[in-house]
Image (cartoon, rainbow, N blue to C red):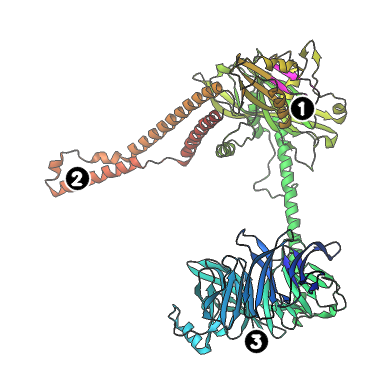
Amino acid sequence: MLQGEQEQFLSYNGEVLVFHLSKPKHVEGAADKTVNLSVRRMAFDRDAQLFIQKSSGVFNMHASHLEVEIICCGCTTDSRTGIILPCILIKKKKRNNVVKYLLLLLHSSNQFEQSFHFKLDYELKEDIRLFTGPSVLWRHANKLFYISSDTCTVLSAPAQVSSVVWTGEIEGEGTVALGIRTACLLESEDEDEFSASDRAIWGSEFFGYAIETQKMLTGTSFMPHAYSRVVSSVHVCKNQMLKKQLRISLVTVTHKNQLICFQEGRPKGVCELPYEKPCSVKTVLTSTNDLLFVVTFASGNICVVQRRDSLQVVSKWQKVKSVLVDDFIGSGNEQLLLLFKDDSNTEVLSTFRITDLGAVNYASGVKYEHDVPAAAGLEENGLLTVRALETRLQAGYTSVQELQQHLELKKRVILESCRALIDLVEERTHVLPAAKEEGLVSLWDDVENTPHSLSKETSVASKVPEHFIEKLWWRVVGDTLVVGAELTESLYLSLSDVSLSLVMDQDFSSISPMIKCQNKIIKLNKAFSALSVSSCQIEPPPKKIKLDLHSKNYQKEDFPKRCSRVQLDGTKTVIAITSLSRLLAFHHVCCIVLLHAKKQKLWNDCLQESKKITVLCGKILLSLDDISNGKYSVKMQRDNSYCTGSMEDIFTVLAVSVRFSFQIVSSDCTLTSVNSWLLGEMECTPFRECQDNVFCHKAGDVYGTVFNWTLKNPFEGVLTLFCRNLTVLFQCLHSLTRVLPPGCDVKLLRSGSKGVLNEQLALALENEMLTLRRSFFTKESKAENSLTRVNEPSKKIIDTPMASLLDSEEGVQQFRKKLQSEREECERSMNQTMAGALYRETALKIAEAQLNSDTIVWRLSKS
């Protein structure tokens, strides 16, 4: 900011702060006069392309026989909070030559706070700087003085200073003032001979003074001393500490009308400036990551220097009142705000320009004759740049076209693969198109497609008994399609990793035929004594990632490998859930339902894994007419105190619901009120097929909730809820708490029954032990055979007593050979190797077993 002006401008968080100091006014009835310091917050409106006032504030000061003046303003960090705030330095001059200075902070509420004040017997005129604290630094009589809000005492630096060119933060040093002083040749400093001779020749040197530590820094870290006689202003662009050495990049302007860039104390570029007497330099980082240097001159002129291959003046302006750098348009990058002098218009911020010398360019009230064109060669350079950009654009367009062709080819390959999959499960011969038709080059000679290659795969599906899939059904609930396949387990067949897939039977080239869906498994025993719904199990995140990466079947149930006779009488229903709206965009939809599973065989009374199978369950047909008529809707009606929904309807309600189980314990009263609450307030009726589960008919959000209340004893029970979302759950619990006896303990059961988990853990640990033992015996047998073959030549050594071997030179050599052979055999036994395929198979089996047991332990700890 220019010193001594009664109206000054400051940028803060994309806004422009306009400080104005009014002339002293006499107040009636008072001997003192009042001076008002006002601030106006102006924000740029991109639609109107004008600055609009957002808010304002006023600070009143008594001015009896005083001359009040704004010295400078800036943005500094408040050491109390670490927040950067605008601050302004005010001078009050009395008649007895005593000068009082006030440093004010401006808060977001437009309230001014007096940080501190101090008095001097002289006026501040040279190198006044504001920095963190807030603090004030100035130069007077070739000495450096500073005062902060922490001490409120004027301190001085132990150095003679001819000028201060920069003040700011340096990594590892805090606030540093960079200045120029007379060369101190008698000081013993750790500098090289070149630096000392440089100071002796020019008679002046650069120095840095750390305010907090009161330490002098080596000036050659910034720039050579030879430039000390010509530099007028400096801006540090980057500073960091590497290997205990300060690395600094800065830009400076000189009295010789030059702009020079320095890196680590060495000049890296120079540019001639178009005007005389440069005052200051600041940087602008634009949206194109271009670093611009903005140079201000004493005449009120401005120029912008751009650094790419070399430093070059790209634009300049005249009659500029003030220049600010900030994100004024809210784009996330910095722009340059130029405020021009215009005597014809007294309105604040009426004549301005916002630009980043690129796509951003806003102007209001600017007379374009103030803009002076840059160097003559700049237009030619701009033309060459435009041509280069056009070439790059054409190359990019060609690349996009090639990418689109590649994506279309990949889509055709995926569609053809899906058609082949459909033909495979339906036991039809699929004829692949010729390579030329797909725009591909065949890597082998085209031959006639024979069904022989498919016979091996289709035989897997044909060997599955027809009664394996009992029934296929589907229902519609809101925007959700529920497809179920009822399975029956036999004595010699058990399934794990079961899931359903939906494949569109129509030939839609614009979409993928595979339909994304979530799988759930519902198991119901014949006695209808228990009903359980299982989805993807909750597992520790690191365990779940490893399991998913191995199985590559997401959202599937992992069943423990137990003996088949445990699950003889069970019936399972596999359910797939998907969004309905994306399917009904085609009005009529035909989908093929595929079942994926692992077929297991019985061996030693336990099930062992075999190969994966894919079974065609059938097709489902959907149309908007049937859905509108409610053909596939869930129907739950009351009939003689029972709910008459079919098993498919019950499975659908459970599949689209979320399960929560709560353990309720009452130490003083029995829990008979829970059953009365279900049948009374919640208006529940039991299912005719499974009477332990009741369906809620109460109007409102809770309608359709399924409850299961199981009493372990009169004082303890487990309440299981199947509800649509958490809101319904909270409503049910809120209603339940009003009928429970006082002192009841309600606990959420996260991972199911402890008894079932304990049984699963025992089976998992047993499986882990057997896996480790089998892998160990396999390794030992293979390694033993290998060692036996390797050690066969060693049998030729004569097994004679040790003493007889050491009697002669030949015996000693024979003993050495025998000892070396035994040593090598010992090393081979300690460093056994196996084939890579065997190692991968063994490691995978061990990891599967350990992950399964660890997962059950984690679930048991959460229950």
SS of the residue under disc 3: loop
Mark 1, residue position? 619
Residue 754, position as x, y percentages in the image: 55, 23
Compared with 211, 317 (above or below) is below
Nearer to us: label 1 or label 2: 1
Nearer to us: label 3 or label 1: 3
Mark 2, residue position? 815
What's the residue at 71%, 67% (across, down)?
Answer: 286
Instruction: Residue type at mark 2: give it.
Output: Phe
Asked if the residues shown at circle 3 and circle 1 are in contact, with their CB atoms under 8 angstroms apart, the answer is no
Instruction: Residue type at mark 3: give it.
Output: Lys
Residue 373, position as x, y percentages in the image: 79, 80
- Please report the bounds of the magenta region as a residue range: 692-707
Mark 3, residue position? 256
Q: Quadrant location of the N terminus?
A: bottom right
Task: Please name whichever residue, 650 or 238, is drawn nearer the observer in this view of the structure.
Answer: 238
Find the distance from the CA under tag 3 to the CA under tag 2: 91 Å
Residue 90, position as x, y percentages in the image: 69, 72
Nearer to us: label 3 or label 2: 3
Question: Looking at the rendered structure, which numbered label has been put on residue 443?
Answer: none
